[in-house]
Image (cartoon, helix red, strand yellow):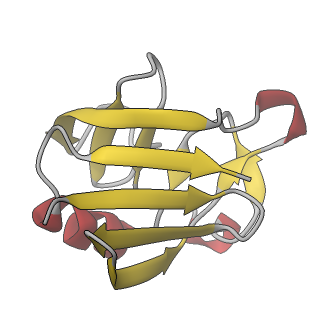
Amino acid sequence: MARWIEVSTSKHRLRLYDGNRLIKSYPIATGKILTATPFGTYTIINKQPNPPGHVFGVLWMGLSRPHYGIHGTNNPSLIGKSVSHGCIRMFNHDVLELSSNVPIGTKVLIHK
């Protein structure tokens, strides 16, 4: 079975699946009203550990929608809120775990 990611912006949850089987659920931060996280189906196109600027935490996973990604955070108190410029923020330890469990090309479904 293929692994894929589901993101619920209203529940502030990212879920990792293997086929129909839920593997793990993570708390996330998503986009605020004026810079909402875009709905749709995307793929992970790259991974960059320790991205420059430190605002992306310990890891960046770029999505097929330009300028959007799943990444760590330098402010973990914001997880669970709608505060980003559209990206999906995770606790640093969670984004590292997720990244080790999904290859480039993994499908990411984002919905309300």
Location of residue 45 (image quadrant): top left
Question: In the rendered view, would you say 69 is above or below 17?
Answer: above
Residue 105 spot, x, y in % from top left: 17, 38
| Position in image of residue 17 (x %, y %) | 32, 71
Give the x, y percent position of residue 10: 78, 62
Q: Who is closer to the viewer here, 15 or 99?
A: 15
Quadrant containing the N terminus is bottom left
Q: From this viewpoint, is residue 28 visible?
A: yes
In the rendered image, the vertical position of residue 30 relative to residue 11, given as above or below:
above
Residue that appears at 66% across and 38% down: 37
Residue at 65%, 73% (x, y): give it: 77
**At 44% across and 16% down in the image, what residue appears?**
66
- Which residue, as the protein is rendered here, is positioned at the far top? 66
Where on the picture, by quarter, is residue 91?
A: bottom left
Looking at the picture, tell me which residue is in the foreground, 25 or 22: 22
Count every numbered label the image shows and give the total. Answer: 0
For the point 56% across and 40% down, the residue is 87
Q: Is residue 74 visible?
A: no
* Vertical position of residue 26 compared to residue 62: above or below: below
Is residue 68 shown left or right of residue 102? right
Q: Position of residue 65 (x, y in %)?
A: 45, 21
